[in-house]
Amino acid sequence: MTTAPTLVIGATGNVGRQVAVQLTERELPVRALARRPEKANLPASVEVVPGDLSDVDSLRAALRGVDSVFLMWPLMSRDPAEAIADTIAGSARRLVLLSSAAVRGDSDDAISRVHRAVEEAIEHTSLEWTFLRPHGFATNTLGWASQIRESGVVRGAYGSVYSTLIHEADLAAVAVTALTSDGHVGAKYDLTGAAALTQVEQVRVIGEVIGRETRWEEVPREVARELLLQRIPAEYADAMLDAFAHLASSEPDRPTSTVEEVTGVPARTFAQWVADHAAEFDPAAR
Ligand SMILES: NC(=O)c1ccc[n+]([C@@H]2O[C@H](COP(=O)([O-])OP(=O)(O)OC[C@H]3O[C@@H](n4cnc5c(N)ncnc54)[C@H](OP(=O)(O)O)[C@@H]3O)[C@@H](O)[C@H]2O)c1
């Protein structure tokens, strides 16, 4: 009997790429939806098909013969959420959604609103769904890479705020477990990395792992916003700064043990993540 492929949406992104790789490592068939298949650069065994989430017909075509789906939401808009959820439910049985821990609170920023709407749309289908609700991604610190390569000094706001950055490989491991084994239907997994570190400490750990002197320089929120706008849209920059402001005035973010409970393996440390991405911070490697 041949196993139906898993459709991975966002397979060229941080988490989706890991999901595709980890499924192929288990010798499971993977189909990746990609806007530019020729640039996907995925393992040879992955079937890459053209498609775009803003074009539901392309999604429907990519779903043919698929039993399970990994979905991440790359869109700024929540409008197509119902159409996409219904289209997936029309073909597949199981879905793992990369959502966000931001859905849990009462925050009303753009990111929380979009993720809430996507979760609700999926809950209204007959899909066997699992929601991954991560706190911050370790990949967020790649936003500091050019500053670290150039001077070792990271300028930002809210340096004393703790976050529990998670490795994308751990998120993918949870996703692959939920896609390939029973007992995860209806779960909303609260996912973090191994420990809570302040932003100041994260910059120090990067320096320790790459063997260079690095330090945090606190700047006013407005200056930090201008720096963020050089690489992300204003809506996301404001949501990110609002999230840090919220964390600064509330209980510090704390690690959960969900990665280990689901996968049987403890979450990777931030130092491990830096070691896996050291080349990004190394001026000589660019
Ligand atoms: N960063 C955090 O701290 C954090 C925390 C919690 C939740 N999240 C959520 O995690 C998600 C981001 O995950 P990530 O970092 O793995 O993503 P990512 O690295 O930013 O990758 C985005 C992916 O989406 C694809 N994509 C973009 N537009 C598309 C479209 N119209 N149709 C189909 N595919 C499209 C991109 O493919 P192309 O190759 O075509 O560009 C790429 O594969 C977001 O929903 C975010 O809100 C993030």
Image (cartoon, helix red, strand yellow):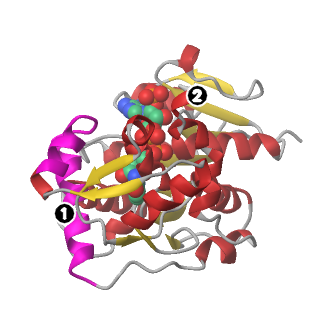
Q: Is residue 272 magenta?
A: no
The residue under label 2 is 285
The correct choice, above or below, for 117 with respect to 41 in the image is below
Per the picture, the main secondary structure of the magenta-coloured stretch is helix
Which of the 4 image quadrants contains residue 123? bottom left
Q: Is residue 241 magenta?
A: yes
Residue 184 coordinates in the image, percent (x, y): 63, 70
Q: Is residue 168 above or below residue 16?
A: below
Give the residues in magenta: 223-250
Could you tell whether 211 is left or right of 140 in the image? right
Quarter of the picture containing the N terminus is top right
Q: Position of residue 6 (x, y in %)?
A: 66, 42
Decide which of 148, 58 is in the foreground and name it.
148
| Residue toward you, 201 or 225 | 201
Residue beneath the point at 58% across and 51% down: 274
| Figure check: 237 above or below 58 | below
Residue 70 appears anywhere in the view? yes
Q: Nearer the viewer, residue 174 or 253?
A: 253
Q: Who's the residue at 84% across and 41% down the image?
A: 27
Query: In the image as oriented, which residue stretches furthest toward the top?
Result: 38
Question: Is residue 87 something one can see in this rendering?
Answer: no
Query: Which label sits in the foreground, 1 or 2?
Result: 2
Q: Earlier along the polypeptide chain: callout 1 or callout 2?
A: 1
Side of 55 where 16 appears, left or right = right
Q: Which mark is residue 242?
A: 1
Determine whether 195 is above or below 3 in the image. Answer: below
How many C-alpha atoms fall within 10 Å of the one at disc 1: few (<14), some, or many (≥20)? some
